Image (spheres, rainbow, N blue to C red):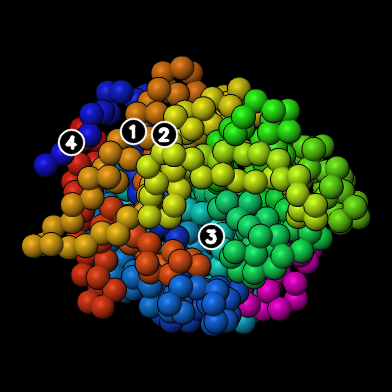
Amino acid sequence: MRFMNFSRADFPDEFLFGAATAAYQIEGQAFGGAGPCHWDSFAATGGNVEQGDDGARACEHYLRYEEDLDLVRDANMDGYRFSTNWSRIFPDGPGTQNDEGLDFYDRLVDAMLARDLKPFCTLYHWELPQWMSDIGGWRNPDVTQHFADFAEVIGKRIGDRLSHIATINEPWCVSYLSHFIGEHAPGIRDIRAAARSMHFVLLAHGRAMQRLRGLGLEKLGIVLNQEWFTPIDDNPESARAVDISNGIHNDWFLGGVFQGAYPQIVLDDLDPHMPAGWQDEMPIISTPVDWLGVNYYSRGIMSANQLPGAMWPHVIHHRGSLPRTQMGWEIYPDGLYQTLKRIAGSYSGCTPIYITENGMASDDTVINGEVADDVRLAYLNDHINAVARAADEGVPMRGYFAWSLLDNFEWSFGYEKRFGLVHVDYDTMVRTPKASYYALKAAIHS
């Protein structure tokens, strides 16, 4: 058996280890009175999701959560990051809540506490209710108030037992990836839709923060996905391509949350498409957070796209020569270290930082009851060591959550990409811990 070469002694005393999941990806949308969400309709549209998969059954975590939490506990982990499904709580509209859904999250949180696991809750991990999508979704300013209402319901019901609360997971994916690139639900490719959703998703975060503060809740934050960008060469055009990419992917969201300002290099193009009066809402967006979640997977090598008729933002993302995961993403742990140094130095200062997602997909199979995933084992080991390096240099690191606990529904990639520490047989739902699970378990043993 291969081992990881770090221990808890390499991290601050209060540092936590855990694993992360998301509601739609594991729970099973068909259970517990959940209403339709925009991922259901997106998946039902041919060509959007590999093999036509959807989240109706997923990993049946709604039925098997006790078994899954045993896996977290038995891996010597301190915390479990989960998300609440908006469409499970408000299945039909903003007025009537589904008590069956709230009861499930009651049971889930209590089960974590019974296993001495700290519950890290993300309120929104992309399950936009279909009723909200039908009236414009993240392009409609009403979404910000409806989301704040949802946050308040969750806060009142389980907030007293939660260790940490994040409002929204990966607002870049919620907005730009889904409304300009069109890769995720609702699958729109429109610059105005992108601009408005990029603003409203942060305004929803800010309004939810204020509601939760009003309930007296603490340890409130947001989860931002970050990518490390480098130029393909020394040309000024390539350096500008990096600045644009940082602006759209990283600085728009970091700047909004921590500085109440968007990067001008992005506003130069998006300002005509922004909602009227957006500047007046920046103080809400920059409501102080208690912690920051960072999701990191890979790097981007950038150059300028100078071809006639090139689509905004006029940059090209190149594939480098490093080994890649099943997703085609380069394995670049130094990018995580550099990202953490950049965030703490330019934005978050002393705000505690948790790695809320980090992991890789591989084509894992069970052979004689075991899953040999040595590449993932090395990936996690190298990235966790990058976190330790950042902590040693003063970045206020407080935790690391591997993505993901389970193989699951990987959005537009369906069930073909396996990120889990634990293999899931989607026919039988049998869980089989992989070699990386056992190696992480040994490394973080107290």
Residue 437 among magenta residues? no
CA–CA distance between discs 3 and 4?
Answer: 32 Å
CA–CA distance between discs 1 and 3?
Answer: 27 Å
Coordinates of residue 9 in the picture (x, y in percent): 27, 23
Q: Which residue is mark 4?
A: 3
- Tell me the number on the disc at residue 333: 2
Occupied quadrant, residue 291: top right
Q: Are marks 1 and 2 in contact (CB under 8 Å)?
A: yes
The type of residue carrying mark 1 is: Asp
Q: Are marks 3 and 2 in contact (CB under 8 Å)?
A: no
CA–CA distance between discs 3 and 2?
Answer: 25 Å
- Which quarter of the rendered picture does the C terminus lie within? top left
Coordinates of residue 297 in the picture (x, y in percent): 46, 44
Q: Residues within 10 Å of mark 4 (few under 14, many from 20)?
A: some
Q: Which residue is mark 1?
A: 382
In the figure, is residue 310 to the left or right of 246?
right
In the figure, is residue 311 to the left or right of 122?
right
- Which quarter of the rendered picture does the N terminus lie within? top left
Q: Which residue is drawn at the image coordinates 80% and 55% (left, top)? A: 309
Q: Which residue is drawn at the image coordinates 65% and 29% (left, top)? A: 347
Q: Nearer the viewer, mark 1 or mark 3?
A: 1
Q: Residues within 10 Å of mark 2 (few under 14, many from 20)?
A: many
Q: Which residue is mark 3?
A: 125
The secondary structure type at the circle numbered 4 is loop
Q: Which residue is drawn at the image coordinates 72% and 45% (left, top)? A: 305
